Amino acid sequence: MSMSREEIREKVIDITCDQLKVSRDQIKDESAFVEDLGADSLDIAELVMEFEDEFDLEIPENEQGIRTINAAVDFISGKATK
Amino acid sequence: MPDALTRRVVITGLGCVTPVGNDLEAAWDALLAGKSGAAEITLFDTRDFGVHFANEVKDYNPDSFMEPKEAKRADRFVHMAMGAAKMAMHHAGLKPGLYQPERAGVVFASGIGGIRSIEEQFERYLRKGPKRISAFTIPYLMINSAPGYIAIDLGMKGPNYSTVTACASATHAIGLAMRHIQLHEADLMICGGSEAGISILGLGAFTNMGALSTRNDSPTTASRPFDRERDGFVMGEGSGALVLEALEHAQARKARILAEVLGYGFTDDAYHITSPDETGVGPARAFSQAIAASGLKPTDIDYMNAHGTSTIFNDRTEAKALQMVFGDHLSHMAVSSTKGHTGHLLGAAGAIEAVFTVRAIETGMVPPTINFTTPDPECGGIDVTPNQPRRREINYAMSNNLGFGGHNATLCFGKFRG
C-alpha cells in the first residue's frame, strides 16, 4: 500500500466521525476513542472492522494499544508499510 | 374480583408514526379524510416481486427522537418505536423527573423486529465474510430493543419486555401493561408496538403465501376491508404508543385523561398456524372476555375498530365472531377497519388501532372503512362505516386483532368518568 501517513490519518478521522457521529473539530490526534469520543465496546468492534476493511489489514483482537487516533494511525501506518 | 384488580387505569398520552401521517394529528386527519398511504415500494427494488406496493412510512427522520449515534445502532422499527413513544409522552405532558423510574415500565411489541437488518447483515456476510457482520446485529434484530431503548431514553426501570403474537402483538402489549398497573407493579406504563417488515423476506413470503393484494395498478384501493372485491392485505409499517397511568397517579399530576382502559380478552384458536378457525369462536370468546372483564354487556359497545385485514379468511371469521357476540345490537353499533388507509402494520396494528380507538372516543368521530363498494353477504348485518366518517357519542369501544398462531386479542376502552 502506498498511502502516506497523512492520508491514513485523514481516513481514520473520517471513519471515526462517521462511526461515532462526532464532528471533525471534536477530534484531536490524541483523542481516545472511549474516554474522549464516547465509544463503547460495540463501537470499538465496529471501528476496528471499518479500519480493517478500509486499509485491507487485520487488527488482532487483543490489540489493546489502539486507544487513540494517533495510535490507530501508527498501527495502520506500520502495517501498511510492511 | 380480587382487590388489586379494582385499580383504575387511564390513558393520558397517544403517539404514532403511520403510513398516513408521522404524528397523531396528521394520521387522524388522513383517517377522517379517507386517505390511503399505499404506493410503490421505495425501500428496495421490487422488480422481481409479484407485489410492488405497500404502505410505507414516508420522510420519517429518527434524528428528531434519537441521538444520531443511537439511531445508527438501531433498526428502522426501533426508530419508529422511539418516535411514537416520545410523542405519546409529550402528549401526556410527561418527561423524566416527573415520575419515579422504578414505578414506570414499557411493554412494546413487534411481530418480526429487525428483519431488514437481518437481511442486510446476511448480505454482508455473503459479500465480505463472517468478520464483517456488524457488532450491532443482535441489538438491530432483537424485538425487545424497542422497549430497551425506550427505557434507556426515558429512564424507566419497571416491568419491561416485548410481546410477540404476530398481528396481535401490540394488543397483548397494551393489555399486559394495563395489568401491571392494576397489580400495583407500576404506576405508569408506555405500551404499543412497532413494525418495519416491508423487506425482501417479508414481502416475498407474504406474497408467496397468497396473503397480499396483487392490485399493483391501484395501490390506494387495494386494501378494502369487508368488501367483496378484496384480494388480500397490503403490508404496512409504523408504530403506535399509549401512555397508561394509574388513575390516582394521573390525577395527582392533574393530567388530561383521554379515556380509560377497561379490560381485555386473550384467546387462541388452537387450530392452524396461519389460518383462523373459520367458525369465529376464538375471536368471539376474546370479545366476550374483554366485555365481561370490563363489567359491561355486548349492548354497551358503541364502536369496534376491527382487525379487518382485507383478506377473505380474516374478514369472514371476524364477521362471524361479531354476529355471534353482538347479534341484533350490530345494527346499533359502528364497526370500522382503518387498514383500508394504513394497510396492515402486523405487530404494530393493534397499537395504532388502539390509538385510533381512543381518539374516536375522545372526539366522538368514527373513522370510516374506505374502499368499501360491494358488501360481502358473508359479512352481513355489520355497519362498517363505509367511506365516510360518522359523528356519534362513543361511551365504550373495542379494538380487536387476530394473529398468525391463532391468537385473538381484544381490548375494551371507555370514556373517562371521574
Image (cartoon, rainbow, N blue to C red):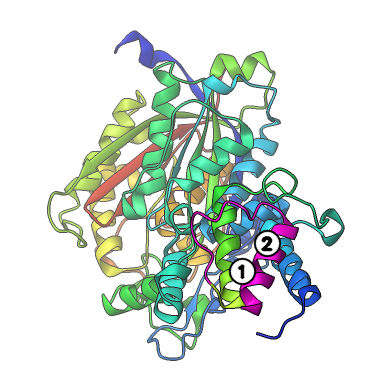
Q: Nearer the viewer, residue B411 or B361?
A: B411
Q: Which quarter of the figure is the C terminus of chain B placed in?
A: top right
Question: Looking at the picture, which amino acid does disc 2 mark?
Answer: Ala
Q: How dense is the environment of label 2, judged by Cα within 10 Å: few (below 14), some, or many (20 and up)?
A: many
Q: Nearer the viewer, residue B218 or B319?
A: B218
Residue farthest to the left?
B271
Report the residue marked by disc 1.
A51
Q: Nearer the viewer, residue B327 or B234?
A: B234
Q: Which mark is residue B202?
A: none
Quarter location, residue B26? bottom right
Residue B410 horizontal/vertical position (percent): 34, 41
Quarter location, residue B215? bottom left
Q: Which mark is residue A72?
A: 2
Residue farthest to the front?
A82
Chain under numbered label 1: A
At mark 1, the secondary structure is: helix
Question: Looking at the picture, which amino acid does disc 1 mark?
Answer: Phe
Magenta-drawn segment = A58-82
Chain under numbered label 2: A
Confirm or deny contact between disc 2 and disc 1 (CB under 8 A).
Answer: yes
Q: How dense is the environment of label 1, judged by Cα within 10 Å: few (below 14), some, or many (20 and up)?
A: many
